[in-house]
Amino acid sequence: MTDLPLRRLGSTDLMIAPLVLGGNVFGWTADRAASFAVLDAFVDQGGTMIDTADVYSAWVDGHRGGESETMIGEWLKASGKRDRVLIATKVGMLPGEGGEKLAPSRIAAAAEASLKRLGTDRIDLYFAHQDDEDQPQDAV
């Protein structure tokens, strides 16, 4: 994977490898040691983007959501690899956080909560996990 060319992501300025690591298992079926090992291997082999969401893993008994973001944030801090990886996360499926669905107030509150869990000052790609038919697209 280390010699894969970077590609522009859509119409953004983001340049990524053609493989993105999905992080929904971190903090759930993958414990800290396994999560850190996978994340280290991915980045060390040239991976450039990790995908997560605020809702991961709210469906598990005893979880509230944000477990994946928290685990990735702990790894970012411990590994010092924040500048080597792009973080994508999503909003729209976790109940609450400043409103319902994709209300602007909810997006703002959820983004702040994600930043805190990730332990970073930026989210490189932030997008809706599902559509909100009640919100005009220009409001989102």
Image (cartoon, rainbow, N blue to C red):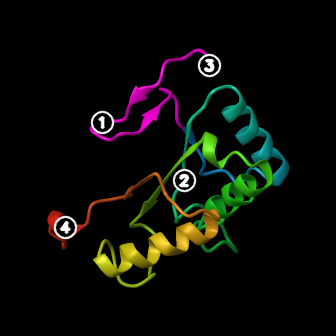
Q: CA distance from mark 2 to mark 4?
A: 23 Å
- Residue matched to label 2: 52
As drawn, is 105 to the left or to the right of 134? right
Q: Main secondary structure of the magenta part?
A: loop
Q: Is residue 28 visible?
A: no
The label on residue 86 is: none
Give the labeled residue for mark 1: 10
The quadrant of the picture occupied by the C terminus is bottom left
User: Residue drawn at (54%, 17%), measured in percent from left and top?
Assistant: 4
Foreground mark, 1 or 2, reads 1
For marks 4 and 1 on the same chain, the one whose residue lies earlier in the sequence: 1
Magenta span: 1-20
Vertically, is 87 above or below 60?
above
Specify which label sits upstream in the sequence, 2 or 3.
Answer: 3
Give the Cα distance between marks 4 and 1. 24 Å
Q: Nearer the viewer, mark 4 or mark 3?
A: 3
Disc number lying in front (2 or 4): 2
Q: CA distance from mark 2 to mark 3?
A: 21 Å
Write the residue at 81% across / 45% down.
34
Q: Earlier in the sequence, mark 2 or mark 4?
A: 2
Distance between the alpha carbons at the discs numbered 1 and 2: 19 Å
Report crowding for label 4: few under 14, some 14 to 19, many 20 or more residues within 10 A (C-alpha).
Answer: few
Determine if the magenta segment contains residue 15: yes
Q: Nearer the viewer, residue 44 or 57?
A: 44
Q: Secondary structure at mark 4?
A: loop
CA separation, marks 4 and 3?
39 Å
Residue marked by disc 4? 133
